[in-house]
């Protein structure tokens, strides 16, 4: 029996409405000791993810740990994308053990969880393994996470992937939400985010549009 292909997206791909993004502990104190990724790239990738989520109206939870007493405020690149949104501050290192966060997860009611934050081996591993254990589908934006060393970050990613989490990158997250350049209502927003935060790809978009009037699709 032959397999028949159809021009439809696979069920494993994310859409703007099928998941909750949780951005965890993007705070000064956590960033000071992060060495698996430099601070400029970390802030840029976090901004890309935040602006993608805000632009596509993804259900998003922003959470901090000991904001007032120790870790400091969340990166402005993230909070600027969600003006007025309440930060859920925790005492627990594992976000999934915080009652207020879980109440919000349940209010949103989506079975897919996308995680990014600091540090990979503590504040991302904890909710990833906990959510997987409770039957959620988990994605981790690897380059919008960081840890005290490359070894710590990589071993944390290995552990989560082996448990069933699906790794992805910040630019991949943006483009997966857009997915089709014929979606004209979000085209300018997507290319605008890419131009601002998308590194060499963003420069290429700027160059093509400026020099040739090029247009994807």
Image: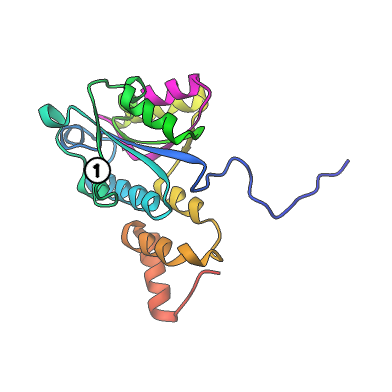
Give x and y (percent) for residue 14: 53, 44
Give x and y (percent) for residue 160: 45, 26
Q: Quadrant of residue 70?
A: top left
Tell me if 14 is positioned left or right of 121 in this view: right
Residue 131 can be seen, yes or no: yes
The secondary element bearing badge 1 is classed as loop
Q: Identify the residue at the far front of this view.
A: 107
Give x and y (percent) for residue 97: 34, 19
Figure quadrant of the N terminus:
top right
Tell me if 130 is positioned left or right of 135 in this view: left
Q: How many marks?
A: 1
Tell me which residue sits at (36%, 48%) in the image. 49
| Camera-side residue of 8 and 202 | 8
Q: Which residues are magenta?
A: 126-148
Residue 155 can be seen, yes or no: no
Tell me if 108 is positioned left or right of 76 in this view: right
| Camera-side residue of 58 and 191 | 58
Residue under pointer 1: 38
């Amino acid at each position: 029996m032959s397999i028949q292909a159809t021009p439809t997206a696979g069920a494993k791909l994310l859409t703007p409405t099928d998941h909750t993004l949780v951005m965890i502990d993007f705070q000064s104190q956590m960033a000071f000791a992060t060495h698996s990724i430099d601070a400029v790239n970390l802030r840029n990738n976090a901004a890309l993810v935040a602006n993608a989520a805000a632009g596509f109206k993804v259900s998003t939870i922003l959470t901090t740990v000991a904001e007032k007493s120790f870790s400091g405020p969340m990166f402005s690149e993230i909070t600027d994308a969600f003006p007025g949104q309440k930060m859920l501050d925790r005492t627990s290192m594992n976000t999934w053990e915080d009652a207020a966060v879980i109440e919000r997860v349940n209010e949103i009611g989506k079975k897919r969880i996308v995680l990014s934050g600091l540090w990979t081996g503590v504040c991302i591993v904890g909710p990833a393994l906990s959510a997987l254990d409770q039957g959620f589908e988990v994605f981790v934006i690897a380059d919008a996470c960081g840890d005290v060393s490359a070894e710590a970050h990589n071993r944390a990613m290995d552990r989560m992937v082996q448990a069933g989490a699906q790794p992805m990158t910040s630019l991949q997250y943006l483009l997966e939400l857009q997915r089709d350049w014929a979606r004209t209502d979000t085209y300018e927003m997507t290319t605008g985010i890419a131009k601002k935060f998308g590194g060499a790809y963003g420069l290429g978009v700027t160059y093509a549009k400026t020099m040739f009037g090029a247009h994807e699709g």
